[in-house]
Amino acid sequence: MKQIHNIINNNLSIALLIFAGFVTTFSGCKKEFLQPEPLSFFNPEETFTTRGGLDAALAIADRHLRSYWTNSTYQDLGLPISTEYMFSEMDVASKTDDGAIFADIATRLTPTDMPERVTYFWGETYNGIKYANTILKYIDVVDGLDETTRNQFRGRALFHRSFRYLALCFQFKDVPLITKIVSSPKVNYRSTKREAILKKITADMEQAVQWVPDQKDMTLKGMVNKGACRQLLIKCYLATGQFDKAIEQADLLINNSGYSLMMNNFGDLINPYSATWPVTRNVIWDLHRPENKSVGTNTEAILILPNRNNTDMGIKMNSMRNWLPYLDNIGLSSPDGKQAVRYYLASNGSFRSQYDYVHALGRGIAHIRPTYFAQKSLWYVNGVNDQGDLRHSTTAGNWVTMESLKYNDPSSTFFGQNVRLRNAAGALLCTDTIRSYFDWPQYKYYVEDPTESQNPNEINHRGGAGDWYFYRLAEAYLLRAEAKFYKGDIGGATADVNIIRTRAKCTQLYTAVTIGDIMNERARELNMEEWRFTELSRVSYVLALSGKADEWGNTYTVDNLSQNSYWYQRIQHYSDFYNKGKVTVKGRSYTMAPHNINWPIPNGSIQSNGGAQLYQNPGYSGYNAAIPRWETWEEAVADEDKTQ
């Protein structure tokens, strides 16, 4: 593991020197980050004509993927990945003391008033495309490389570019297609239709999967491998309606690529605070320990994002700070009026090791919080709350409910009793249930920061650096189930979903899955791994392509998704915030509109592209159906060299 970090970091150090001055840095939330900047302002140096320069560009592209989960600029606003969940049925913004809380999305999200967490996905995704295009531009002028090595560079660069364009297509829809590094600024880009971009990246990934080696033939983990290329190609085939090809690639990935689901305990048991929160060792807990994600015995990991504590690669995620409830809040009390949960220093006379929640669980301030659906109703299958599901098991220690915590103020007459929401008379014991009272998946969110957890005089434990999954095999089964569903093979789709449920020790298995069952299983299995909004947007599009009905019998059309989509129906049926206009303690309402299935094109990019008009999405100011877009990717590529 140390070798992984050292080699990638050495390349990254070179890259940072190269990119200094023309790539946005992440040192803080600066005003200039929001200023209009043409998408093509990029002037590489001669360094890229060397193998070391290309290694550096590839290393920074690899590391850049991790930034969607770790970017420190936004840790006090919420990690970028949290935005994906706020635009879904799974989570909502919950930092209720923030006057600008991103709750009223239907009216607040505009091309000129976009929270920085949304613009991050625009600006930084295009930055990632720059890195990929740099490699593709310079690979042919580097001396001393054989064709196999050149093709490996090309394949990895195509993966990076294709992954980012797949995301842009389902976050922002029709966007500029940029495949080249131009010699002078280009400010007359035209948007390219989503369908055309999807065809382009599908063709690119068909090539990449031939060029990039299998992980077993690589010395490092954390670099793009053939398995990752196959997984992305499956999604491209789904997005272009090529369901048979998607199944074929999934079969190859599942059966013939050396991967297999982890079915038993493995690696190290990581449970440093068992006195407070004991874990009964189980495969789900082991699978999601950062220390186990990249070990050789983990045959499920396809692509991991290296990010280890106490290394030169480690970047703290602050996962518990962002995603756990605000427990040590004076507004959360015991029936006798004492603060329900206290965080004590070990030197404090009130400290009890069995109730050391700050170190065992983490100190949260709830930037986002799960909906009732995500906490409760999601876990019902066949009308039964599946008590065996390890992913939702408080008994195993994987899941934490508020009621499984104990009042830990020794001066309270309720000390040691379970926390409760209401007193005997039915009155609420929590003044802000949005922020301070919800359950969570501890096995996913717990990323230890030894600096804080092992310091008895530290009252914080916000979450450290930890390896993260980018792709793993469980998702391949669920993608194959999705493809089989579109093909009408309900039995095959059901079998694939049940394989995942069997590994989780579920007692309830499906007999005939709907698209809703498949998406629910994704929610259970891939929480904070998948880009939830992007996947729901993608599935909405593909479901419309297929003509298949959703779990309520609705069918959709591709051209009408901004008015009605599967994504929006899930919001309406499952979210208990956006669909009910729930109001925060400061009077902010939660809203979502059908057109929010695509985010607005940022006004800054529209203004900086002064030679042509970018296409704005329906429902946002500036929308004009008459604005021309490239119908094919070939047209867009041919236009890239035209600066006037």
Image: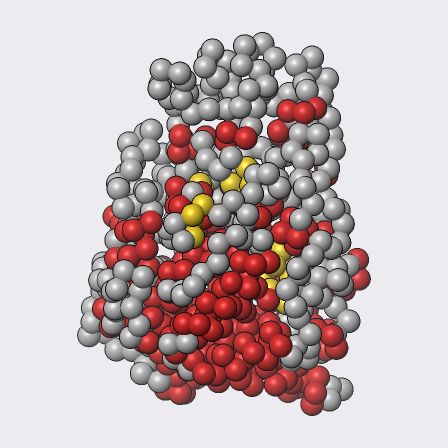
The answer to whether one can see residue 408 in this image is: yes
Look at the image and tell me in which quarter the C terminus lies.
bottom left
Residue drawn at (55%, 73%) of the image = 231
Q: In which quadrant of the rendered image does the N terminus lie?
A: bottom right
Residue at position x 62%, y 41% in the image: 396
Task: Estimate the x, y position of residue 595 in percent, counting from the top left.
Answer: 26, 59
Residue 467 or residue 612, whichever sits in front: 467
Would residue 581 be found to the left or right of residue 525 on screen?
Answer: left
- Is residue 356 shown left or right of residue 508? right
572 w.r.t. 642: above or below = above
The x, y position of residue 525, in whole percent, is 52, 56
Specify the quadrant of the image occupied by residue 550. bottom left
* Residue most extreme to the bottom: 147
User: Considering only vertical position in the picture, is 503 above or below 225?
Assistant: above
Quarter residue 462 falls in: top right
Residue at 41% x, 72% y: name it.
Answer: 490
The relative height of residue 99 versus residue 60 in the rendered view (above or below) is: above
Residue at the spot x=55%, y=61% of the render? 500
* Residue 110 percent across, percent down from the top left: 29, 53
Q: Quadrant of residue 393?
A: top right
Residue sitting at the far right: 3
Residue nearest the viewer, comparing 473 with 303: 473
Q: Is residue 375 above or below residue 420?
A: below
Q: Nearer the viewer, residue 68 or 263?
A: 263
Question: Is any part of residue 198 visible from this angle?
Answer: no
